[in-house]
Image (cartoon, grey):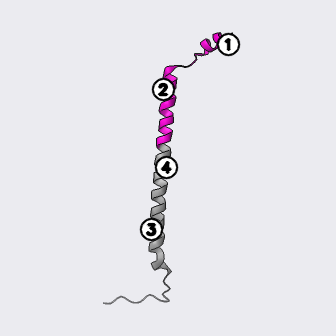
Amino acid sequence: MAKALLGYVGGSDPRLIAEMRRLQQRVQDLESELVRIQAENDELAAAASHDSFLESIDVPQAEPALT
């Protein structure tokens, strides 16, 4: 009976297995890209915070420009 049900449902279709493998590979590729982009974003954020030290300088009043 189980063999009949398995045959009726279709069992392991090679096209379905190939599609599942392709999708698993795509997920792995996207996860790798996500890790790379997050690392790049962290580097950019660190560089931006490093450059923000100029904003921390306390200047009571803006000086006039030379004319």
Measured Cα–Cα span from mark 1 to mark 3:
62 Å
Q: Nearer the viewer, mark 1 or mark 3?
A: 1
Measured Cα–Cα span from mark 4 to mark 3:
20 Å
Of helix, strand and loop, which mostly describes the magenta segment?
A: helix
Would residue 30 be found to the left or right of residue 2 on screen?
Answer: left
The residue at 48%/87% (across/down) is: 59
The residue at 58%/17% (across/down) is: 11
Identify residue for label 4: 34
Is residue 16 within the magenta segment?
A: yes
The residue at 49%/61% (across/down) is: 42
* Badge 4 element: helix
Q: Which residues are magenta?
A: 1-29
Mark sitting earlier along the chain (3/2): 2
Quadrant including the N terminus: top right
| Amino acid type shown at disc 3 | Ala
Within-10-Å neighbours for mark 4: few <14, some 14–19, many 20+: few
Q: Which mark is residue 26?
A: none
* Badge 2 element: helix
Within-10-Å neighbours for mark 3: few <14, some 14–19, many 20+: few
Check the image and name the residue furthest to the left.
Answer: 67
Quadrant including the C terminus: bottom left
Q: Which mark is residue 47?
A: 3
Is residue 18 within the magenta segment?
A: yes
Q: Which mark is residue 18?
A: 2
